[in-house]
Image (spheres, helix red, strand yellow):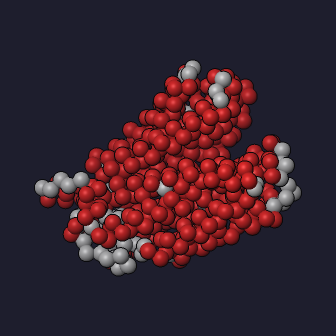
């Protein structure tokens, strides 16, 4: 094995930094609405239903943009599509500053959501095709931490901007991190493995739809379906906890709003560390082992936190929640990107991830329904079941390292030319 191929060159490091910044901007943009929503509702005289529906339109945009963006990245290139979508969601978010009606905000928030959803999947695909297998999970786990870091930065920005200048200035300020992210991407190129796969497809003379190619290959189809279920259960647990933890602190435990804000911020901070750590451990001990541990650990820690939490100790317990509940995302990028061939990787990865938004949208509703008869804490505790299923599905049904996203030689094989049964991984030590 050529050890020089395991090293990361300047182009790879630049891509990692650019995509890390893109994920930070993604997180900032998404969190801004949650922070500014009370002020928006007050100024525009919106009902709770109307205010909450803005978030629903955002999720709808993320789902549409994520699926379409992944497909387009396979057709037009990862860098080009990512570049356009960063500009699109940063500009759309800034335009919200000039909105005066509910439907104006909905329109720009849907557009922004399309860009956010597209960038997330493309970032994972692009980085996976640049970084060697030895470091792939570490790089993607760190990049995933950028999303949580964006949440924290958005909180800091809002604490200074909202009281002094209002919600319009907060959305206008999104231009700054968006511009930095776009500047970092200038001059970057698609990975050699993607370019080789695209050229091989063109030489074949057959221009089949990526979804048709995915569904025609039995092994890819089975892997895709397994990842869809894994994404649903992961996002059900993750977003259910994210949405309702602040209310749990305030209503169930009696924590004041100021302390609750700091407790949630510390949870996001722990998620940054948890995602980075799980990525590193995924490179050392394997994706399946770390995914299994993170899923089962989250399944245990959520109900345990609810049972033992008091206003005095919940801050420490939430750090443990952040470390474990964000950990599956740290290994998710490498595990999933290595499950699909280069020619259709963007389509498969983005679609499977965005099918998972079914879980993201239904979990808050489930907890809300449960809290009406029991408590918010009981609803959060039930999320442990979802994390347990999430922890079991990929290790049982999906082998790790089926494909090497960085391999130029392997990327020239079309999905229909492979003979990879589920459970028969490629020996990546020969292709690094």
Specify whether residue 330 is in view.
Answer: no
* Rendered residue at 53%/73% (across/down): 392
54 in relation to 348, above or below: above
* Rendered residue at 52%/26% (across/down): 103
x then y, percent, for residue 259: 81, 46
Q: Is residue 223 left or right of residue 171?
A: left
Q: Is residue 345 left or right of residue 391?
A: left
Work out whether residue 91 or residue 47 is closer to the camera in this orientation and state it. Answer: 47
37 in relation to 24, above or below: above
Q: Residue furthest front?
A: 373
Work out whether residue 323 or residue 18 is closer to the camera in this orientation and state it. Answer: 323
Give residue 45's quadrant in the image.
Answer: top right
Q: Is residue 176 left or right of residue 185?
A: right
Work out whether residue 64 or residue 12 is closer to the camera in this orientation and state it. Answer: 64
Specify whether residue 85 is in view.
Answer: yes
Which of the image's four quarters has the N terminus? Answer: bottom left
Which of the image's four quarters has the C terminus? Answer: bottom left
* Rendered residue at 64%/61% (across/down): 383
x then y, percent, for residue 380: 69, 58
x then y, percent, for residue 270: 68, 58
x then y, percent, for residue 193: 30, 60
Marker count (numbered): 0
Q: Residue furthest right?
A: 312
31 in relation to 323, above or below: above
* Rendered residue at 52%/39% (across/down): 58
């Amino acid at each position: 094995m050529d050890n020089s191929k395991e090293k990361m060159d300047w182009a790879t490091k630049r891509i990692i930094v650019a995509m890390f910044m893109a994920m930070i901007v993604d997180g900032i943009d998404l969190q801004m609405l949650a922070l500014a929503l009370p002020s928006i509702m007050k100024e525009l005289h919106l009902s709770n239903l109307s205010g909450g529906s803005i978030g629903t339109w955002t999720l709808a945009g993320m789902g549409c943009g994520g699926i379409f963006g992944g497909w387009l990245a396979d057709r037009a290139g990862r860098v080009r599509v990512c570049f356009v979508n960063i500009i699109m969601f940063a500009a759309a978010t800034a335009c919200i500053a000039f909105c005066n009606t509910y439907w104006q905000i909905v329109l720009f928030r849907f557009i922004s959501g399309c860009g956010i959803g597209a960038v997330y999947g493309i970032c994972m695909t692009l980085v996976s095709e640049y970084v060697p297998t030895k470091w792939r999970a570490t790089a993607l786990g760190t990049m995933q931490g950028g999303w949580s870091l964006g949440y924290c930065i958005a909180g800091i920005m809002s604490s200074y901007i909202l009281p002094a200048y209002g919600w319009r200035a907060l959305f206008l300020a999104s231009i700054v991190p968006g511009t930095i992210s776009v500047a970092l991407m200038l001059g970057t190129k698609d990975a050699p493995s993607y370019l080789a796969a695209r050229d091989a497809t063109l030489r074949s003379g057959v221009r089949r739809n990526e979804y048709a190619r995915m569904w025609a290959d039995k092994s890819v189809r089975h892997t895709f379906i397994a990842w869809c279920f894994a994404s649903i259960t992961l996002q059900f647990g993750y977003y259910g906890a994210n949405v309702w933890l602040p209310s749990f602190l305030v209503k169930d435990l009696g924590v004041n709003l100021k302390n609750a804000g700091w407790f949630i911020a510390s949870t996001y901070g722990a998620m940054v560390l948890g995602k980075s750590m799980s990525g590193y451990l995924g490179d050392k001990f394997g994706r399946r082992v770390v995914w299994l541990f993170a899923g089962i650990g989250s399944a245990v820690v959520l109900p345990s936190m609810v049972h033992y939490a008091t206003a005095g100790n919940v801050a420490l317990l939430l750090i443990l929640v952040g470390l474990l509940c964000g950990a599956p995302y740290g290994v998710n990028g490498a595990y999933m990107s290595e499950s699909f061939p280069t020619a259709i990787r963007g389509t498969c990865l983005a679609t499977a991830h965005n099918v998972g938004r079914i879980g993201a949208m239904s979990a808050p509703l489930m907890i809300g329904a449960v809290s009406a008869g029991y408590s918010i804490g009981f609803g959060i505790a039930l999320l442990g079941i979802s994390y347990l299923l999430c922890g079991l599905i990929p290790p049982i049904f999906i082998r790790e390292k089926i494909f090497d996203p960085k391999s130029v030689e392997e990327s020239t094989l079309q999905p229909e030319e492979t003979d990879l049964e589920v459970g028969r991984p490629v020996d990546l030590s020969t292709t690094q």
